[in-house]
Image (spheres, helix red, strand yellow):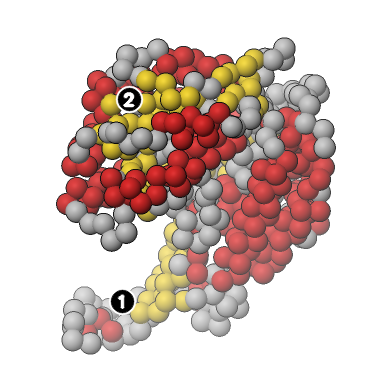
C-alpha cells in the first residue's frame, strides 16, 4: 500500500447555500428514520458495517496516505468501526435503550387517582458531528458518535476533519450508499467541509445536538456556541486528558519489567496521538526504571505525526517541557520536520519529582499530544492523592498498579481520587486500547469532556441523542409502537401495576 504524503487539494468549504440544502434534507429525513422499526434500522447499520469491511483495502490506503498511521493500526480501527455499528444494531433490536416505562391507570393510587402514563425515549433530531483527526475511522465520519446518533434514529451531518478529507469523502459515500440501499431515507448521513461551515451549521436551528472530539480550546468555543443559541442544544465534546498512572512500591517490586514494557508501548503507540495516552507515570523515588525505559524508547522507530499543525504543537509542547527547571531527561527522543512540514517523532521520556511537578504545574501539567510522557517520582504513597488533586482536573482515565492483595488507607484514598476525577478506573494494564463493549465508559469530568454523565464509547453512548417524552391517557391506537400493550416492536416494557403503590416502602417483601 502507498503511504506517501497526499497531494490532492482539500475540498472547498461548504457554501451557505449548500449548508441550507443539507440541513433541509436532514430535517426531511428525520421523521422517516426515527419511525423505522428497530430491525430495519439495525439492518441498515449492519449494511454500513459490511460496506466498510468490503472497501477496507481502498479506505485504509487513503487513510495511510493522509494520516501517516500504520496499516496494522488502521486495519484494526476500521474493524473496530464496523464492530461499533454492529453493536448498536443489536442494541436497538434489544430495545432496552428506549427505557419504556408504563404506569397503569390506578383508582387506588396512594396519592389519589393515577392516570395511565407511558414514557420512553425518542430521537432528538439532526445531529452535527465534528470528526477527530487521530481516529480517522473510529471517531470520524462513521465512528462512534455517528453510529450512536444513527442508531438512536437521528440523521447525522458530519463536519469532516481537514486532516483526512479524501478519506472522509470516500467513507461518507460508502456508508451513505449502504444505508440508503438498505432502506434509510436520503440525507440520513451527509458531509460538510470547513471550520466556518461547521460553526454555521452548529448555529442552524434545525440541528438538535452536537458532538466533537478535539482540543480543549476548539471544543470550548463550540460548546459555548451551542449553549448561546436562541434555543440551546446539548453538545458532547471530548477535549483533553493526561490519564495519570500510579505505581505502588509493591507493584514495582512484583513487575518492574512488565511496567516498563507496557508504559513505553502505551506512550509510543500511534506516536502518542491517543486521547488515553498515559501522560504521567507516578513511581517511587529510586524506582530504577530509567535504563529500561530509555532502552525501550530508543528501540521505537520514528512515526509520522498526523499533520503539520499537530507536529508544530507537539514541538512547542516538547520544548517547553524539556526547558522546565527540575526536568531530567530519560530518553530525549527527537522530532524531525520533513520538506512537506510533516513531523516524524520518536518517544521523549522525562522525569521530575512530585514537588517540582507541583511547583511548575503551569508548564508541565498540560497534555502533550504526541509520544511524550513524564515520570513523576514520589516519596510516600500517602502523598499521591493530595499531589494529584493539586495537579489535575478531570480525565478520561486513571490507572493504578498494585501488588497482589495490596490494601491500605493511602491506596483507598488514591482510588477514591481517581473515581472522582476520571471516567474509567484501571487496575493494572494501560488506558490505550479502549474496548468497544456495552459497559465501556469513555468520558470524564471537565476538561476530559463537556458532559461528565455521558460516554462516547459503549452502548450507553446512544442516550446522548435521545430525549424523554410521556403520554398520558392516550388511546392505544395513537400511542407509538413501543408504548402499546400489543408491543409490536417487542421491546422491554417496565410496568407499574395498579395497586402496587399501597405496598411501597414495605422492605419486608
Label whose residue precedes the other's in the sequence (2 or 1): 1
Decide which of 309, 178 is in the foreground and name it.
309
Q: Is residue 88 visible in the rendered structure shown here? A: yes
Q: Quadrant of residue 192?
A: top right
The residue shown at (53%, 54%) is 435
Q: Secondary structure at mark 2?
A: strand
Is 433 located above or below residue 374 in the figure? below
Q: Quadrant of residue 447?
A: top left
The residue shown at (18%, 79%) is 505
Is 246 located above or below residue 478 in the figure? above
Where residue 128 sits in the image (x, y, percent)? 58, 40
Decide which of 208, 164 is in the foreground and name it.
164
The residue that disc 2 covers is 352
Q: Is residue 389 visible in the rendered structure shown here? A: no
Q: Secondary structure at mark 1?
A: loop
The residue shown at (67%, 35%) is 69
The residue shown at (72%, 12%) is 339
Q: Quadrant of residue 152?
A: bottom right
The residue that disc 1 covers is 114
Amino acid at each position: 500500500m502507498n503511504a506517501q504524503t497526499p497531494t490532492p487539494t482539500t475540498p472547498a468549504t461548504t457554501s451557505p447555500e449548500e449548508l441550507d440544502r443539507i440541513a433541509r434534507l436532514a430535517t426531511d429525513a428525520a421523521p422517516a428514520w426515527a419511525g423505522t422499526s428497530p430491525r430495519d434500522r439495525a439492518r441498515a447499520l449492519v449494511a454500513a458495517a459490511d460496506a466498510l469491511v468490503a472497501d477496507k483495502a481502498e479506505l485504509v490506503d487513503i487513510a495511510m496516505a493522509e494520516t501517516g498511521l500504520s496499516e496494522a493500526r488502521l486495519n484494526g480501527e476500521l474493524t473496530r468501526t464496523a464492530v461499533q455499528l454492529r453493536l448498536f444494531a443489536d442494541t436497538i433490536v434489544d430495545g432496552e435503550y428506549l427505557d419504556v416505562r408504563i404506569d397503569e391507570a390506578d383508582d387506588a393510587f396512594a396519592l389519589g387517582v393515577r392516570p395511565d402514563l407511558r414514557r420512553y425515549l425518542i430521537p432528538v433530531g439532526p445531529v452535527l458531528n465534528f470528526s477527530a483527526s487521530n481516529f480517522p475511522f473510529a471517531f470520524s465520519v462513521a465512528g462512534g458518535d455517528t453510529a450512536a446518533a444513527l442508531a438512536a434514529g437521528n440523521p447525522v451531518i458530519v463536519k469532516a476533519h481537514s486532516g483526512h478529507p479524501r478519506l472522509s469523502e470516500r467513507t461518507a459515500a460508502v456508508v451513505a450508499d449502504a444505508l440508503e440501499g438498505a432502506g434509510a431515507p436520503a440525507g440520513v448521513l451527509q458531509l460538510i467541509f470547513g471550520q466556518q461551515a461547521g460553526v454555521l451549521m452548529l448555529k442552524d436551528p434545525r440541528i438538535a445536538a452536537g458532538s466533537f472530539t478535539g482540543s480543549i480550546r476548539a471544543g470550548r468555543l463550540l460548546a459555548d456556541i451551542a449553549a448561546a443559541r436562541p434555543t440551546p442544544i446539548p453538545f458532547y465534546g471530548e477535549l483533553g486528558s493526561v490519564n495519570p498512572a500510579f505505581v505502588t512500591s509493591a507493584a514495582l517490586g512484583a513487575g518492574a519489567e512488565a511496567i516498563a514494557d507496557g508504559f513505553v508501548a502505551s506512550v509510543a503507540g500511534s506516536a502518542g496521538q491517543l486521547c488515553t495516552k498515559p501522560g504521567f507515570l507516578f513511581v517511587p523515588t529510586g524506582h530504577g526504571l530509567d535504563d529500561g525505559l530509555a532502552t525501550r524508547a530508543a528501540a521505537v522507530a520514528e512515526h509520522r505525526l498526523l499533520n503539520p499543525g499537530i507536529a508544530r504543537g507537539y514541538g512547542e509542547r516538547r520544548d517547553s517541557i524539556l526547558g522546565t527547571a527540575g526536568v531530567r531527561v530519560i530518553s530525549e527522543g527527537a522530532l524531525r520536520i520533513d520538506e512537506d512540514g510533516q513531523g516524524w517523532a520518536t518517544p521523549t521520556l522525562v522525569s521530575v519529582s512530585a514537588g517540582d511537578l507541583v511547583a511548575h504545574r503551569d508548564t508541565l501539567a498540560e497534555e502533550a499530544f504526541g509520544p511524550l510522557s513524564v515520570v513523576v517520582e514520589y516519596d510516600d504513597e500517602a502523598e499521591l492523592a493530595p499531589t494529584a488533586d493539586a495537579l489535575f482536573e478531570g480525565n478520561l482515565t486513571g490507572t493504578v498498579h498494585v501488588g497482589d492483595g495490596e490494601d491500605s488507607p493511602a491506596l483507598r484514598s488514591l482510588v477514591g481520587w481517581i473515581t472522582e476525577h476520571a471516567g474509567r478506573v484501571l487496575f493494572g494494564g494501560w488506558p490505550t486500547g479502549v474496548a468497544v463493549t456495552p459497559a465501556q465508559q469513555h468520558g470524564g469530568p471537565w476538561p476530559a469532556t463537556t458532559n461528565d454523565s455521558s460516554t462516547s464509547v459503549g452502548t450507553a453512548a446512544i442516550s446522548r441523542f435521545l430525549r424523554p417524552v410521556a403520554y398520558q391517557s392516550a388511546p392505544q391506537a395513537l400511542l407509538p409502537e413501543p408504548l402499546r400493550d400489543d408491543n409490536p416492536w417487542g421491546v422491554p416494557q417496565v410496568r407499574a401495576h395498579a395497586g402496587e403503590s399501597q405496598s411501597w416502602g414495605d422492605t419486608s417483601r
